[in-house]
Amino acid sequence: MTERHLIALDLDGTLLKDDKTISLKNKEILKKAREEGHIVMIATGRPYRSSEMYYHELELDTPIVNFNGAFMHHPRNPSWGYYHEPLDIKVAKDIVETCRAYQFHNIIAEVIDDVYFHYHDEKLLDIFGFGNPKITTGDLCNYLNDSPTSMLIHTEEDQLHVIRQHLSDVHAEVIDQRSWAAPWHVIEIIRAGLNKAVGLKKASEFFQIPAERIIAFGDEDNDLEMLEFAGHGIAMGNAIEKVKNIANEVTLTNEEDGIGIYLADFLNIK
């Protein structure tokens, strides 16, 4: 029997194929890994409402990390704890004020499952309307009454760097920011010090599995800390260079069952 491992999965570009489904092979190998006593969990930038279906599809019974570590809970065990570390509302409103001096398409604030749009936005409603959140539209300085779990600024490529530079000059102490992968020019902001590794560490303490027996898979810059924390940080074949550089190994792409093939080999799953 191989020792028990904790397997942490990013969703988009990692577990999910480009059409946002989980391949049969990945599903089958993850199921076998669980039957052999390994622990499988999801760690994603998505809110819970848009990762919940994958949690159920894999029949998981573990905590889940959402919003890149700003929210973590155990869907099947409410007494496990509920970790929500939002941005200070004052900081959130300062950011909105800052943006008025720049060109941007929209600012979106999420408070767990409530979504606030600065401007009405058909295109983004499709993405954020998933899982039926409560949606409010209007100037965030007036409508946002709670500290947001995460904020997104949707802008143009040339403005992205200018706004990010300003944010790091003014708010570096209190926020962590990153940009989304193309084609979206989006700046994502959460409270400083949060990332997927923070959630993974809580899980590893709970399951008493040391970092050297954690296998984490990812493809984007919001996976960097998690891959560094894990004893086995595995980059997908389609990952950005930065992720491949810090990873212990690189597996096949998300279209080629990279997760399943790596795990079958590493954990000796027939």
Image (tube, rainbow, N blue to C red):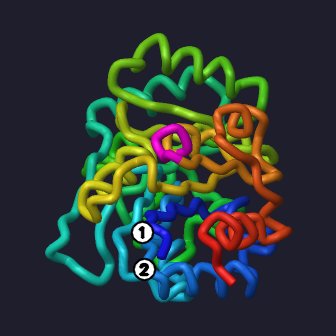
Q: How crowded is mark 1: few (under 14 residues within 10 Å), some or many (20 or more)?
A: some
Q: As drawn, which residue projects farthest toward the top?
A: 169
The part of the chain drawn in magenta is 227-231
Is residue 24 found left or right of 116 in the rendered image? right
Few, some or many residues within 10 Å of mark 2 (<14, 14–19, 20+)? some
- Say what amino acid the circle numbered 1 marks: Arg
> Which of the pair 33/1 is nearer the observer?
1
Tell me whether circle 2 and circle 1 mark residues in contact (CB < 8 Å).
yes
Q: Mark 2 points at which residue?
A: 37
Tell me which residue sits at (59%, 58%) in the image: 120
The secondary structure that most of the magenta stretch takes on is helix
Residue depicted at x 56% and y 86% = 31
Q: Which residue is painted at 23% across and 80% down in the image?
A: 77
| 100 in the magenta segment | no
Tell me, for residue 260, which label it has, or none: none
Q: Position of residue 130 (x, y in %)?
A: 56, 75
SS label for mark 1: loop
Q: Classify mark 2: helix, strand or loop.
A: loop
Q: In this view, does 176 lie to the left or right of 250?
A: left
Q: Disc 1 marks which residue?
A: 4
- N-terminal of the pair, mark 2 or mark 1, is 1
Q: Is residue 106 visible?
A: yes
In this view, the residue in front, 255 or 249, is: 249
Q: Quadrant for residue 165, please give it.
A: top right
In this view, 146 is above or below 194: below
Pinpoint residue 168: horizontal percent, then vertical percent: 49, 17
